[in-house]
Image (cartoon, coloured by chain):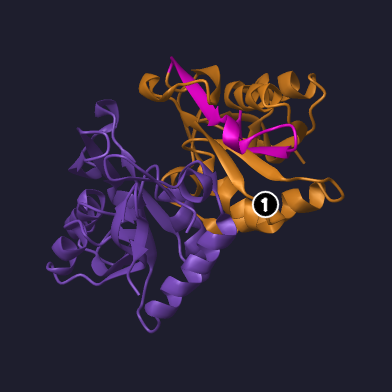
Chain colours: A purple, B orange
Amino acid sequence: MDGVVKAGDILKVDNFLNHQLDPQLFYRMGLEWKRLYEGEKITKILTAATSGIAIAAVAALAFDVPVVFARKARSSNLSDDVFTVSVHSYTHGDESTLMVSKQYLGPEDSVLILDDFLANGAALTGLVELAKQAGCRIVGAGAAIEKAYQPGGERIRSMGIRVESLAKIVSMDEEHGIVFAD
Amino acid sequence: MDGVVKAGDILKVDNFLNHQLDPQLFYRMGLEWKRLYEGEKITKILTAATSGIAIAAVAALAFDVPVVFARKARSSNLSDDVFTVSVHSYTHGDESTLMVSKQYLGPEDSVLILDDFLANGAALTGLVELAKQAGCRIVGAGAAIEKAYQPGGERIRSMGIRVESLAKIVSMDEEHGIVFAD
């Protein structure tokens, strides 16, 4: 992987995931999630703005389903028509509100939740909560990269939700670089 | 098209472009831009966060090139390593700063600039400015939907930049709905 480890447990992946994007890689990731979830009925892919959008949109081609992305809410666009959840960002150290219109997520949906990173699990947990509010069946979740030494993966799996991470980092620091799980 | 016209010249396209996404449509749009720009050398697709990311990422599959998206800058992450431009949002009525890392855009690049909407042209003009700062060759631009009765398209074309909009709206209002150009 092409990431660069920075101080403070930061993995900089600007060159393929977060500023410059590698859509061909995202499509192969979509095919891999499709293979992992083979036989499961999936009607929608759910992700969160901004960082999940590109991965989810390209990966969705492999599933031939629409994507719904939870938006960061401005107080001006909150209404009874939306599901909302408060999410703590460990990266930015603040709280934000994610919202999804009730029009696009409901009990008829079987959702796969995708995101770029799984570390503390705040964003994925927020998406799980939104899907539960909507009464969706949650088929599972997928992260491009999981920091397996952080609690998010265990937190979500302990809720009985299947999580498929395509790269699992067991440790990383500036001196030794990134160590992946087999 | 599935858009809904709202008061104040707002076209709501949440159901396929801006909250729920239709990646299969975006891929067909990518193939159409590929056809329109056939024979042109394109090394990167440039777009802006948030609304352009999904379209650009999926459309880029048709071109087999990376995408670079200009980020909305926080003052904390501005540095000498980035190109920046100030952009006025007519939708939100405020100014924001778009930034691209100098690492991902340079004189070796021939860029196609893609975005969801072209109306006043503020976002596209900002992206043109970033590409010029980087010394890129600008092959052209593409918008999913152009409001042809607003000045953005003319503004950018008068700079000598080719613009290919896949749907051109010549008028719209709540009473008569949307009228497309042929």
- Membership of A136 in magenta stretch: no
Crowding around mark 1 (Cα neighbors within 10 Å: few <14, some 14 to 19, many 20+) is some
* Quarter of the image where the C terminus of chain B is located: top right
Q: In the rendered image, which residue does mark 1 sit on? A: B65
Residue A76 or residue B102, whichever sits in front:
B102
Q: Is residue A143 visible?
A: no
| Region of the chain picked out in magenta, as a range | B93-118
Q: Chain of mark 1?
A: B
The quadrant where residue B133 appears? top right
- Rendered location of residue B85, percent (x, y): 56, 18
In x, y percent, where is residue B70?
53, 32
Identify which residue, B165 or B33, lies in the foreground: B33
Residue drawn at x 50%, y 41% is A19
Residue A114 to residue A75: above or below: below
Relative depth, front residue between B174 and B30: B30
Element under label 1?
loop
Residue at (64, 34) in percent of width and height: B105
Residue A90's spot in the image, x, y percent? Answer: 22, 40
The residue positioned 46% from the left and 23% from the top of the image is: B91
* Rendering coords of residue A175 (x, y %): 34, 49
Q: Residue furthest bottom?
A: A39
A106 relative to A78, above or below:
below
Is the residue B127 above or below the residue A12 in the image? above
**Picture residue at 65% right of the left edge, 43% below the top:** B45
